[in-house]
Image (cartoon, rainbow, N blue to C red):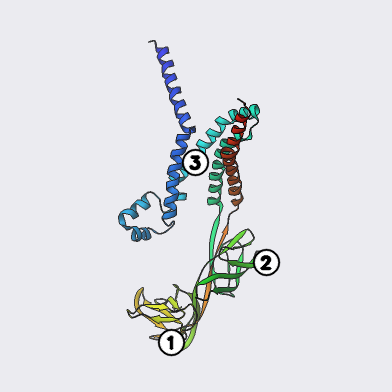
Amino acid sequence: MSENAQKEKNKDNTNGMLKKIFNFLKGMPFSFILLGIISFACIMGSVIPQGQSIAYYMDSYGARKGNLIIAFSLDDVFRCWWFIALAGLLCFNLILCSISRIKSVIAAWKRTRRIGIWGSWLTHLGILFLIVSFALSQYTSSEDEIYGIPGSSQPLGDTGLQIAIDSFDVWMRDDYTVDQYVAGLTVSNEKGEKQRGESSVNYPFRAFGYSFYQNSMGWANYLDIYKDGELVKTDLLCAGEYSYPDDFPALVIMFSKFYPDFAEKEDGSFYTVTPLLKKPRSLYGIFYNGNLMSMDIVKPGELISVHDYGFVLRDPVQYTLIVAKTDPYAWTVLVAASVLIAGLVLSFYIRPWEENRRKDNGEN
């Protein structure tokens, strides 16, 4: 075989191999493989809590599973490089498939004028749009948390918005189970414009492009700090927060937990009988240089003495936790879902009906 013939043969082999690779990349088997892996990743992202610390995964799943979770980025599935790469490959597959089939779909439409022919093509296009819109939503949306008691006000990050908590109510049933949490909010922007409304569970309040969701609630205590009998500082502590004398930061008091209707079991553990303020007690801890010195239960207003200092936890009040979300591309998800549903309807309902009608009319 001559050198030129060998080159032509090698070129044909290369072109044939590239064509096979191209056909595989645009084919359904490749898309099914990608969808399977992505579906598994989504399940992992739903089962495994996302965005926690390494210590959390080690404690919750053990060293072996914890290391696997961290190694494969299962702690942040939807933002890790391999999930993004898989989604990109699926988009590439759908784009190739859509481009390669559009001419035949248009030709079939011109020949038969049956709208069901567009079903499969629109389904692929809808999946592509859905992936792209989901990515836009993930990388352009933001979420912030604010919490406080009625009458408090605080900025929402660096957005220029100010959130005032006007009221907070917990609606209870006769058996003391919670029926609804309702927070009255006033949102102000930098221009001084204000919008007022209520946020409750499953019914967010929307203002200035943000949705404000009622997330959770808890109890707070006012803390008075005395030195040599003189009041030197007042703080508001939510459960889990701490404070200290400004002139002696090594001495810390932590408000650990609140019991509205305190009771003690035979084994010495504490619980609350009802969520009502009948017998309120606060669990606190005193720390010195990071070491726990003491821990006890006190009534509201009861003095806790530590050398020259005194601490008083008083006037328990409920606070609310509000989550503020914005998603400027949420509408694209709706558009993508509409295209996908239209494609599925055309594929599984309209096209079979058109085919049956064609057969009934004796058409080829």
Q: Nearer the viewer, residue 76 or 124?
A: 124
Q: Secondary structure at mark 1?
A: strand
Quadrant of the frame with the N terminus: top left
Q: Residue at x 60, y 49 (%)?
A: 334
Residue furthest top as drawn: 2
Asked if marks 3 and 2 touch (Cβ < 8 Å), the reply is: no
Q: CA distance from mark 1 to mark 2?
A: 42 Å
Q: Secondary structure at mark 3?
A: helix
Q: Residue at x 45, y 31 (%)?
A: 24
- On screen, residue 167 versus residue 44, left or right, reads right
Amino acid tagged 3? Gly
Q: Nearer the viewer, mark 1 or mark 3?
A: 3
Q: Residues within 10 Å of mark 1 (few under 14, many from 20)?
A: some
Residue at the spot of label 1: 303
Residue at the spot of label 3: 88
Q: CA distance from mark 3 to mark 2?
A: 42 Å
Residue at the spot of label 2: 194
The location of residue 356, given as percent across then percent down, is 59, 33
The location of residue 342, given as percent across then percent down, is 60, 42
Amino acid tagged 1? Leu
Asked if marks 1 and 2 touch (Cβ < 8 Å), the reply is: no
The location of residue 179, given as percent across then percent down, is 54, 70
